[in-house]
Every structure is written in C-alpha cells, then in structure tokens.
Amino acid sequence: MTPDLWLSDKQIDAIDILNSHNGISELLFGGAKNGGKSFLGATWELGDALVYPGTFYFIARRELVDLKKFTTPTIFEWFKVNNIDFSKRCVFNERDSIFHFRNGSKLFLLACNHLPSDPLYERFGSMQMTRGWIEEGGEIAFPAYENLKLSIGRWKNDVYNLPAKLLITCNPKKNWLYTTFYKPWKDGTLPADKAFIQSLVTDNYFRQSGAIKVLDSIRDPITRQRLRYGEWEYAEDPSALIDYDAIAALFTNDHVLATGQKYMAVDVARFGTDKSIIRIWHGLRCIYRDEMTKSSVVEVATRIKVLAADFNVPRPHIIIDEDGVGGGVLDLLSGAKGFIANSSPIYPKETEKYDNLKTQCAYRLADMVNNFKLHEATEDTTVIEKLTEELEQVKDKNVDNPKRSLIPKDKMKQVLGRSPDDLDTYIMRMYFELKWIETGDTVQVTSYANMVRQSSGKGNMIR
C-alpha cells in the first residue's frame, strides 16, 4: 500500500521478511532511537488490514496510555502521507482501544502491564489474531511475549495465505531481547525462525532534521550508547555489582552440582501484595522455589516445616527475614536463624567495610554470581525474568565512598514496581557462605584460616 518513497532500505528489508513465506515467524527491528520503528509497524499492519478484509491485528506495549500518546499519532500520520482518508476507511473506538476498518478488519491496542490476577499473562493466550506487533519490546516481560506470539496465525491466515508473523520493535535492552535475539544474532546462532535488523537514526532518511543533534546531546553515556548508536553491549552502570552475562548464566550453570549441605531461605510477605518466597539449595544449586500469597504467620511456618522435612533441611540451616512479620514466623521455628538486614556485618573487622549485614551478603552474592558459582535450576520463565531483573538492581549506593553500601529496598521497588523478594532469598543464602563458627550460645567470627585452626573441639561448622 505504501510506495518505497516513504520507506528506508532497512524498512523495505523488514517488509520483505514480514510478507514472505521464508520460515521466519519473528522479526526484531530497531536497536536505536529514531530508526523508523513505529512507521514500519504502522506500514505493515495498516497495509495488511486494508488489503485483507476481516483480518485481525494487535499493537502491544506495556502501558496502554503510551500506545495512545506515542503510537496512534504515527497511525494517523501514515494515512496522511499515503493520501488515504482515515474517516472513509477506519473508525477508532477510543474506549475499547480498537481501530475498526470499513472492510471488517480490526487493529487492537493491548496493554502488557503486569496484573496480580494474571501473573503469567494468560489473558493473551485465547486471542485469535492474524498478525501482531510488540512496540518497545524491552518494556514487557518475557511471558507476555510468549503468550502474544501464541495468538498470531489464528485468524484468516489460511484464507489469504498469510504466514503468521510477529514484529517486535525496540531499543537495546539487556533482558530477554538480548538473550533471545541479539546475542544469538551476534554469535551466528539465531534460530532460522527469527531475524534481527538493526536500524539506527542514520538509516532513517525521513527523520526530523534535528534528530541526530538531539541524540548527540544526551549527557548520560550509557543512554547515549543505547539510543544514539544502538549499542547492545553498552557499558554497565558503574554502580551495578553483577555483570548481566553472569546473571544470564545463573540459569545455565549446570556445572554447579547438588552436593553437600542443604539450606533454606525465607522472605516473609510484609504487605498484602507481597509474596512469601521460600528457596531451598543443595549446596550452591537452588533446587526448589515456593511462593505463598496472603498467608498467615502460622501458614508460612507450617509450610517451612513441611518443606524442611521433605528436603531434609536441618533447622540451623534455615534462615528467615526477621524484620517485621518474619519475626513471628521465626518464633514458631525453634533453631532457625533470623536475618536482620541492618545488623552489623558478621566479621568484626568488616564493620567499617560494609554498612550492614545485608550489604555484606549482597557483595558476597555479587562475587559468587560473577564467578559462576551459583545455579538456579528452573525453566520457569516468570521466575527467570523476575530474578534477573532483581539481580540487576544490586548496586552500590555510593560508589565514591570506600564503605560499601547497597541502594535501599524502597528504591528497588520503585524501579521494579514490586518488592525484590526473590533477590532477598539469595542475599540471605549468602549468610551461610560467610565463614563462621557456632560456639555454644555465642557466635565467634574469624577469618577462614583461623576458623580451620579453631574448629577442632569448638562446635560444628555450618556449611
């Protein structure tokens, strides 16, 4: 429907992929600001909707308000530049967020925000769509992407011989886009049913005249790398303690075997929307994860007892967040350990090195993840996504201060939109990795070398 006059070479290449029977079902396009992402999506879906009567399409983004503010103007602009009278071809029902075409085709605007009532995004699984477009793919969760792609190829594709296709437009983001598309593309291992086209501002002939100047003026170097130059391997946040590739490897570190002692860490829900998370490790391999929603202190304590018995975890190897509600759970589990985030670091000599115990454990966690010493044995994409996002928030509050600190939990919540409960269980697990000896009713802390020398006849080493 649209003459090549209005498309760049990269956009034409994308249209060719999206309209061909080539075995490619998913195309990631973009990787920088002003690369022509939105106009490509509008060209493809609007052109199809006009040509093939009665077909259904979607544009999905995390927030519906952002689609209406920033994507729908491109839709109206597309009609204008192609000299097509919108009112004669289409009606936009703003209340239902649906474009109704006069020929029976429909274009649905979908919000992909997380809903507590639908944590797995199953609301998309029952849709019947011809084709679909995810806008700003870096904003949405992996389960949303998985369910959205299941909806395409289910409405009149056979009638018009249209292959099921999913377009994803984005800016560089080190999340599932990086691991699913960019890194395999860079390594030459991208599956045959996926494709990636990187389009920069310089590839877009129809950019605004001042677009490059605006991007060049971005002061933050990381943001400039991402949005101006389309750099996926952008420099890490200097305050971040854990490398992204090491986080991704946490779920594939099969060399970390289930050996040695077993441990349990429990983060108890503080508020109605929080969840109590229970993790069990065999050595440094997490072998089980459980979550409880809106559970009482007694229910959480009972669940811990059942799991401890099932997995043979001794009470001294159970650690529970003692702050707030967790203290009540701890009272019901004699022999379990309490974790107080703001208490002093374990080693007396490290009191001046770390703000508190949680900071000390977080730094130990960062060291172990960065050195591929831990393994989360799960294939649950929701858990992988959540834990990845939370580990990315392990950052030093003040990199210029020699005393190590951790950004506060409230700030993590603001970034994540939820409490970092999975992260907290990992931080607490590190309590047992910090070398200590229990001597009677007191805890004597020493260096590892002293611990080995003093351990004989002075209690049992917890590890």
Image (cartoon, rainbow, N blue to C red):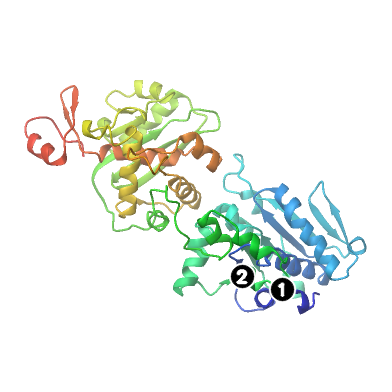
Which residue is denoted by mark 1 in the rendering?
A: 162
Q: Quadrant of the N terminus?
A: bottom right
Q: Quadrant of residue 7?
A: bottom right
In the drawing, does residue 223 fall left or right of residue 260?
Answer: right
Q: Quadrant of the C terminus?
A: top left
Q: Position of residue 139 (x, y in %)?
A: 59, 52
Q: Position of residue 143 (x, y in %)?
A: 56, 53
What residue is rendered at 52% in x and 38% in y? 413
What residue is rendered at 44% in x and 26% in y? 299
What residue is rendered at 51% in x and 72% in y? 191
- Nearer-the-camera pick, 283 or 434: 434
Above or below: residue 21 compared with residue 437: below
Which residue is denoted by mark 2 in the rendering?
A: 199
Q: Mark 1 near mark 2, Cβ–Cβ under 8 Å?
A: no
Query: Which label lies toward us, 1 or 2?
Result: 2
Of the numbered discs 1 and 2, the one sitting upstream in the chain is 1
In the drawing, does residue 438 fall left or right of residue 63?
Answer: left
Q: Amino acid at mark 1?
A: Leu
Structural distance between the alpha carbons of marks 1 and 2? 25 Å
Question: Could you say whether the residue bearing mark 1 is in a helix, strand or loop?
Answer: loop
Mark yes or no: residue 47 visible: yes
Question: Could you say whether the residue bearing mark 2 is in a helix, strand or loop?
Answer: loop
- Nearer-the-camera pick, 158 or 67: 67
- Nearer-the-camera pick, 195 or 7: 7
Above or below: residue 448 compared with residue 124: above
Q: Amino acid at mark 2?
A: Ser
Q: Position of residue 393 (x, y in %)?
A: 45, 45
Q: Quadrant of residue 102?
A: bottom right
